[in-house]
Image: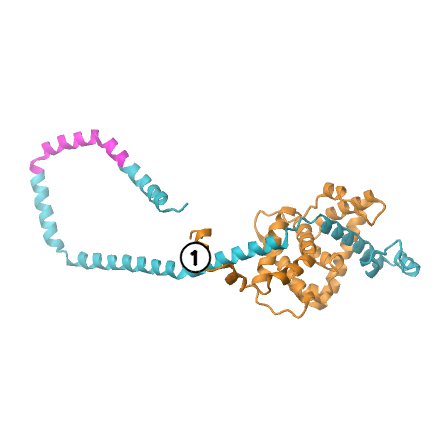
Amino acid sequence: MEAVAFGRWPEHADEGLTAHVATCAVCGDLAEVARVLHDDRDAACREAPAPAAGMVWWRATIRARAEAARTATQPITALQGIAAACAVGLAGGLVSVAWRSIDWTAWMDRLGGLVGHLEKRRADIAAVSALATSHALPVLLGLAACLVLAPLVLYLTLADD
Amino acid sequence: MRDVTLSELDGFGAATEAEEAFQMDEDSFRVFYERTARPVWAYLSRMTGDPRLADDLLQEAYYRFLRASVAHENDAHRRNYLFRIATNLVRDLRRRPGIDSVPMADGAHAIDQPDPRSADVAAGAARRVDLSRAMARLKPRERDLLWLAYAQGSSHQEIAEMLGLKTASIKLLLFRARRRLAALLRGGRT
């Protein structure tokens, strides 16, 4: 190993060592592998396009500052998320309270009266429905476009460059 | 989460605050870097088989080294720690799906780089081509062991620390890897 490391193997190696390596399978493997790897390392070190130390230091500094900045803004982002969750929870609570306060029996009675009234005017309703159906397609397409485009517009508006 | 722009970075303090998070000052780093950059790059290049990737990993390795809060006894300990970081980076890279973990050193490029110690330039280049083919057929840990032991000259204890293995097992693992590589090298020539 030492002979290889100092470039003495095999041309300038001790004769006894050379003779031993020629007869010993283990040492023969060691000598061959060590020499080839050592030569390859030297070649790789010669061709290594390592950047200047100053460049590596500067990049590390920039990255450390960026990470420090992100760490500093993390509590703000967390608070924003918590506030949004509280708002959604509060809205859900209010809807739940309002839902329970509705008198559903009175509403069903009113709906029944409305259905009875509409039954008397069935022919008029059929004519209006036919008219609406013939013009429904553009309306539906417009609604579908709004549903598809609205999230995209929101994303483009809120996304940063 | 959006990236922070350079103008916003200015509002978070001067560069010296970031440098204080590093384990060494710039002058010490320059000296250390000049001594270790080429061997580390050579190790990364040969283990990944991609010189461009080795450039990125080199920067990443030194960044992690600078940010690590580790007390080093001497320069050799510092160097071993750096190689340990480099080894972990290569290992993480190999675990990514779709990454071709078989290193194929550029044999044609090796031929263009003459070996000043050897009078027979062609023989030296041919040996490196054979080596790259043989190394490609070894397991990743075998490649790591052989390079660190015979190219880098690390001791068994140092290799064990870098690879996260027991020192007592290095000798046997190294013996098997060496025997396998020698057989592949001999088989490549026949």
Q: Is residue A122 magenta?
A: yes
Q: Colour of chain B?
A: orange
Q: Position of residue A76 (x, y in %)?
A: 37, 60
Residue B89 visible in this rendered orientation of the protein = yes
Residue B11 relative to residue A10: left or right: left
Numbered marks: total: 1
Q: Which residue is mark 1?
A: B11
Q: Position of residue B169 (x, y in %)?
A: 71, 66
Whether residue B172 is situated above or below residue B128 in the rendered picture: below
Pick the front one: B27 or B45: B27
Whether residue B108 is situated above or below residue A48 in the rendered picture: above
Dot 1, crowdedness within 10 Å: few (<14), some or many (≥20)?
few
Numbered range of the magenta stretch: A119-142
Q: Position of residue B154 (x, y in %)?
A: 73, 62
Q: Chain of mark 1?
A: B
Q: Colour of chain A?
A: cyan
Residue B190 visible in this rendered orientation of the protein = no
Mark 1: amino acid? Gly
The main secondary structure of the magenta stretch is helix
Residue A115 relative to residue B49: left or right: left
Q: Position of residue B62 (x, y in %)?
A: 61, 58
Residue under the image location 71 percent in, 52 percent down: B138
